[in-house]
Image: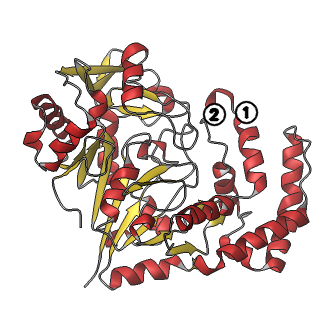
Amino acid sequence: MAGKAVVIVGTQWGDEGKGKITDYFAEKADIVVRFQGGNNAGHTVVVGKKKFKFHLLPSGGPHRKIIVIGNGVVVDPKVLLEEIKMMQDEGFDVDLKLSSTAHVIMPYHIALDGMEEAIKGKFKAGTTMRGIGPAYSDKAARFGIRVWDLLDKAILAEKLEKVVPFKQKLLESLGSTKKTDLQSIVDEYFQLGQNLRKYIVDTPEIINNYLDEGKSVLFEGAQGTLLGIDEGMYPYGTSSNACALGVSAGASVAPTRITAIFGVTKAYTSRVGEGPFPTELSGDIANKIREQGHEYGTTTGRPRRVGWLDAVATRYTRRINNLDGIIVTLLDALSDINPVKICTSYLLDGKKLGYWPIQAEILAKVQPQYIELPGWKQRSDQEWLEIARQQNLEALPKEVQSYLAKMEELLAVKLSAVSIGADREATILLRNIF
């Protein structure tokens, strides 16, 4: 009997609360797979009284599940080893399967990241400076170093002998005066490979075998669909496919093996970095949402831009992901704001626009059109938790129920779960995803 392959993706510009949601469902999965991105994305996993902040490891580790880093991920081996050690120091065994064909973030990628960003001017994406984009560039240009290369010092040296001098010249042309020492990179990264050796496998075989054996596999997306390199707002995004389409390429699993796809949707909208943001707020309301929602980047610590829920953008991501359901998070962060608003359409040059234009230049010109709904009063964390424990939408304040009903109507997709607090138990499950 074939297993279940369930995908969780973000429907906005990332930071939708996927970490908590994936953590919640990871307990019910056999395997959790990361399929794209790098350590530019962060998520928090809470198990008991222990809190883990991961940038590379999938969410299932603290639940003692098998965790997989797929071939579509770009890996900083130093960061990965730090996260493994963090778990081991807390008494957890790490059952990690690291793809032998995942690409490696090298020191020159990190050096290039900031320098390339600087010359882009107004088209800069607001990168985290972790080397993600340059690593994906090298992957496409076939200059990349893969995890497997780290295990053979002769092969690693042979490849870097071609790449490092080229990167040195490129860095110098951009104004760098720092010299790159080839031998020190070979020595360091070969040793990093030895430290990771026991985790390195051919993950396509592993994942597909698990599905053949009837296992439940949870695919964990990073960032959000609107940041995707092809499906998102280019160039103001990331360097990988951050939607469900990325699973097939990034984990080597056929699209027909996917059982269900769920989108995590924040009750409002936020983003980090540059680019047009039609529903962006400023002033007191923005500050209130930012503080109540703790809207500061896990990776960068930067305050996030915040705005009202954009149903136009989220309808777009619902369609291209073909979502089976949405999981709404951070409803509690909209407390004590009255009224609350949802963008239902745009105006462009005086004409109504009901769809999301994929060109940044057009999106920058639209005017959001809103509906208003009554807000709700703040509850304490404990009060929200008590509501969630009833596992019934009718236990929510009437205003929250109305807001969720309007979201379902505007997005044309059913609710699968609702999150009303940071605690993993502050979640109302409306359907089992496995």
Kindly report the distance in space between the C-alpha atoms of the residues bearing marks 2 and 1. Answer: 7 Å
Say if 320 sits above or below 365 in the image.
below
Question: Quick one: quadrant of the C terminus?
Answer: bottom left
Is residue 403 visible to the viewer in this orientation of the structure? yes
Question: Quick one: quadrant of the N terminus?
Answer: bottom left
Amino acid on which disc 2 is placed: Lys
Element at badge 2? loop
Is residue 353 visible to the viewer in this orientation of the structure? no
On screen, residue 332 versus residue 77, left or right, reads left
* Residue drawn at 28 percent across, 26 percent down: 345
Where is mark 2, residue-wise? 124
Residue 155 on image: x %, y %: 80, 78
* Residue drawn at 10 percent across, 47 percent down: 392
Where is mark 1, residue-wise? 118
| Farthest residue, direction left | 394
Residue 352 on image: x %, y %: 28, 22
Residue 82 on image: x %, y %: 63, 60
Element at badge 1? helix
Dots 2 and 1: beta carbons under 8 Å?
A: yes
Label 2: few (<14), some (14–19) or many (≥20) C-alpha neighbours in 10 Å: some
Who comes first in sequence, dot 2 or dot 1? 1
Relative to the observer, which residue lies in front, 67 or 178?
A: 67
Say if 278 sits above or below 82 in the image.
above
On screen, residue 194 versus residue 338, left or right, reads right
* Residue drawn at 72 percent across, 67 percent down: 145
* Residue drawn at 33 percent across, 26 percent down: 308
On screen, residue 193 versus residue 371, left or right, reads right
Label 1: few (<14), some (14–19) or many (≥20) C-alpha neighbours in 10 Å: some
Amino acid on which disc 1 is placed: Ala
Say if 165 sits above or below 147 in the image.
above
